[in-house]
Amino acid sequence: MRKPARGLTLVELMLVLALLGILTVVAVPGFQSLQQRTQMRAEATRLLAALNLARSEAVRRNVPVSLCPSSFAVSASLDCDGDYSAGWIVFSNPGKSPEVTAGSLVQAYRPLPAQLQLSNRSGTRLVDELITFLPDGSAGRNRTLMICSRARPDLASWSLVMNIVGRSRLVRNWGQCPREPLS
């Protein structure tokens, strides 16, 4: 009596490879969407941390502290310019102006990934304004900043909602992401 051969036949191997190919085609787009959603949430959380830092430093130092768009993390230039996609800085701001000095810098943040954009809630313009917290922790006005995917505007956005007293929170899918990238 012969023992049955162990292993796979060519037909069985081809069937397994075909199934793996089909699973890959179906699963990869889902993983890309998951990666985009995770990256949007991480960047929204990073911006929320910067807002909370600015607010707490304003209260702790008893002077206004601002958050402004800046490419300092890349260029090492202490200027408030551009929009928040280039990065941002937190600095002590007694004069409430966009002028930053070396001694006033609290923290710098790297740019947003290229596939993300930060806009207002209606998605009509990029955010480029100075956000200042007063010594009592208030921010002076309500704001909503929305992070969207440039590549996948159909994905749910993440919004940072800041009320007049300066308290910020994250909200998912609150606002419409623009279909065309803003400039």
Image (spheres, rainbow, N blue to C red):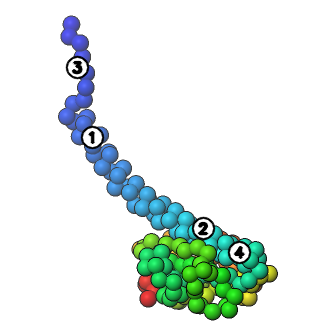
Which sits earlier in the primary sequence, circle 4 or circle 2? 2
Which sits earlier in the primary sequence, circle 4 or circle 3? 3
Determine the residue positioned at 68% across, 72% down: 52
Which sits earlier in the primary sequence, circle 4 or circle 1? 1
The residue furthest top is 1
Determine the residue positioned at 72% across, 73% down: 56
Q: Is residue 40 left or right of residue 12?
A: right
The residue furthest right is 136
Q: Which residue position is annotated with label 2?
A: 45
Give the alpha-carbon distance from disc 4 to disc 1, as whole Å: 62 Å
Above or below residue 35? Residue 80 is below
Which disc number belongs to residue 5?
A: 3
Q: Which residue position is annotated with label 4?
A: 57
Q: Is residue 78 left or right of residue 180?
A: right
Q: Nearer the viewer, residue 24 or 170?
A: 170
Give the alpha-carbon distance from disc 4 to disc 3, as whole Å: 73 Å
User: Is label 2 or label 3 in front?
Assistant: 2
